[in-house]
Amino acid sequence: MRKLVKFLISLTFVMLVATGVRAKTIGGYIDSAVDSVKDTTNSTGAAFSDQNLERKVNNVLSAQVPSGKFTVASYYKHILLTGQVPNKEAKERAVLAVRNTAEVKGVWDYLTVEPNESAKAVSNDARITSAAKNKLMLQKGVNSNNIKVVTDNGVVYLLGRDPGNKSKIDLAITEISKIDDVKQVENLIWYKSKWVKTAN
């Protein structure tokens, strides 16, 4: 499947180049488009749409709140917004900017007013994310492919849509909370057409 998709995207790329479209513009999206096919947390089309929306939101935040450090994840056009900003005014400006971005349906606001996360902390977040994914994979009754894991400053966020038995998810969350340096686990998974924590 991955090879077929990459071939089709590459073919499109060649055709566009032949018609005069700049290679740099299209080429930059080939790998990300293939990665979206691997992302089974939602449908292929929705995953690609979410990737585009994440880029759009990040561009808006960079322009309007350049002093902040943000982690943005989109799931069915609902935005998880985490990170650090220098003051309350910057936080309010950032949240409003995301809510006003075209196509955004809702925002989970987890921004904090504090100094930006260090490079060491970012590396630690990557380790935690990997460990959390492993916990989900090992939990029977949970479809880990339907859960997107994001970690920011030691807080683990789980986004998904009907990934299995809720009690089994809760067991996995308990295990994730035991991972070294995990401060908290936020369950943002959608069960039976309802979010556990509604995005405003």
Image (cartoon, rainbow, N blue to C red):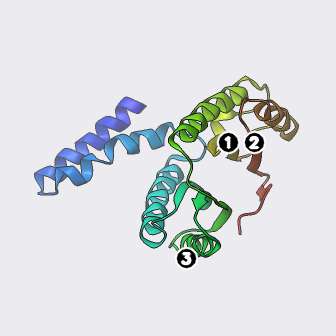
Lower sequence index among marks 3 and 1: 3
Mark 1 or mark 2: name the one nearer the start of the chain: 1
Considering the numbered disc 1 on the image, is that residue within a helix, a strand or a loop? loop
Give the amino acid type for the residue marked by disc 3 in the picture. Asn
Q: Which mark is residue 165?
A: none
Q: Secondary structure at mark 2?
A: loop
Q: Alpha carbon of mark 1 to alpha carbon of mark 2: how far?
A: 5 Å
Q: Are marks 3 and 2 in contact (CB under 8 Å)?
A: no
Residue 155 in the image, given as x and y percentages of width and height: 70, 45
Q: Which residue is mark 3?
A: 100
Residue hosting label 2: 183
Q: Are marks 1 and 2 in contact (CB under 8 Å)?
A: yes
- Placement of the N terminus among the 4 image quadrants: top left
| Residue lying at 76% horizontally and 33% vertically, measured from the top left | 176
- Foreground residue, 69 or 57? 69
x then y, percent, for residue 66: 45, 66
Q: Residue at x 48, y 66 (%)?
A: 61
State which tag comes first along the sequence, 3 or 2. Answer: 3
| Residue 114 on image: x %, y % | 63, 59
Give x and y (percent) for residue 150.
Answer: 62, 44
Tell me if residue 10 comes above or below residue 194 in the rendering. above
Residue 183, picture quadrant = top right
Relative side of 133 to 22, left or right: right
Q: Residue furthest right?
A: 167
The CA distance from mark 3 to mark 1 is 28 Å
Q: CA distance from mark 3 to mark 2?
A: 30 Å
Residue tagged 1: 154
- Relative to the observer, which residue lies in front, 156 or 139? 156
